[in-house]
Image (cartoon, rainbow, N blue to C red):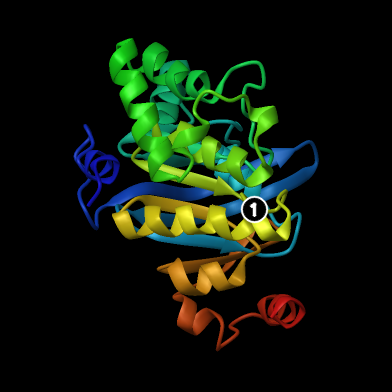
Amino acid sequence: MTETAQDSANGANGAKEGDPIVLCRDVVKRFGDFTALDAVSTEVRVGEVVCIVGPSGGGKSTFLRMINGLEGIDGGEIVVDGIHLPGGKKDIQNVRREVGMVFQSFNLFMHMSVRQNLILAPMTARGLGRKEADDRAERLLERVGIGDQIDKYPSQLSGGQQQRVAIARALAMEPRVMLFDEPTSALDPEMIKEVLDVMRELAESGMTMLVVTHEMGFAREVAGRVLFMADGQILVDAPPERFFSEAEDERQANFLSKIL
């Protein structure tokens, strides 16, 4: 197991390999009169890779954002490594220290170099010294295959390289859980593989991952479970071999017929 994954597996709140680290109980999210999530319940265990698939507007991205405290909870609760949401500002900050998130639009600080992007949060939120933060940034960029880009600016990189910087930046906080919200959807086709390869390596290292994706080959190969979300609900929760061969829901069957 790599250093980051080993650190992740030994979190302060005690969840070990195979223990639940994310618990969602009857989670509800509303935007005005629209119910984006309708009593969603599931759990994710340490070291598990869960892919979330389904039609657009089904609540997938909202679900990830709620796990990371980026959206408030209107009903139910989410527990991340013993931290309960909804909670106070400190609870949300603690969750964000333990949960890394990679967005489809990279969300890098364009006025900062790649190195600066990676060292900022560990120094301010984790209290790392400059040398330790620099060493970690260099190690992580080598891990994602772009160590030679550390002193460039995001605008000088390809989309695939920017997304790998975003992954390394999230890993720099040594999170216990990584969330990926359609991380390849903004990339040109030739850049998708390089990002998926990094994610495969993370999964193999033991990182706990929730991945919203349209890459069905990745889900089939890497996921331990596949969740199918539509209309704000988890309609199917199945291992990939069953998910892709035995449709349990009419909407799942319709979805798969369009993308496979």
| Camera-nearest residue between 137 and 71 | 137
Residue lying at 79% horizontally and 36% vertically, measured from the top left: 32
Q: Position of residue 99 (x, y in %)?
A: 42, 36
| Three-letter code for the amino acid on which mark 1 is drawn | Thr
Quarter of the image for residue 252 reads bottom right
Looking at the image, how many numbered discs can be counted on the residues?
Answer: 1
Q: Is residue 162 above or below residue 136?
A: below
Q: Is 186 on the left or on the right of 24, as rendered? A: right
Q: Quadrant of the C terminus?
A: bottom right
**Residue that protrudes farthest toward the right in the picture:** 33
Question: Residue 230 sits in which quadrant?
Answer: bottom right
Tell whether 10 sits left or right of 116: left
Residue 17 placed where, x, y %? 22, 54
Residue 167 shows up from this direction: yes
The part of the image, by quadrant, that contains residue 256 is bottom right
Q: Which residue is mark 1?
A: 184
> 224 above or below 11?
below
Residue drawn at x 73%, y 83% is 257
Q: Position of residue 109 (x, y in %)?
A: 62, 21
Q: Is residue 173 visible?
A: no
**Residue farthest front in this picture:** 148
Q: Residues within 10 Å of mark 1 (few under 14, many from 20)?
A: many
Which element is circle 1 on?
loop
Q: Nearer the viewer, residue 69 or 205?
A: 205
**Residue 5 at what x, y percent from top left?**
28, 45
Which residue appears at 80% of the width and 41% of the height? 33
In the displayed structure, 62 sits above or below 45; it is: above
Judge by depth and name the residue closer to the eye, 33 or 245: 245
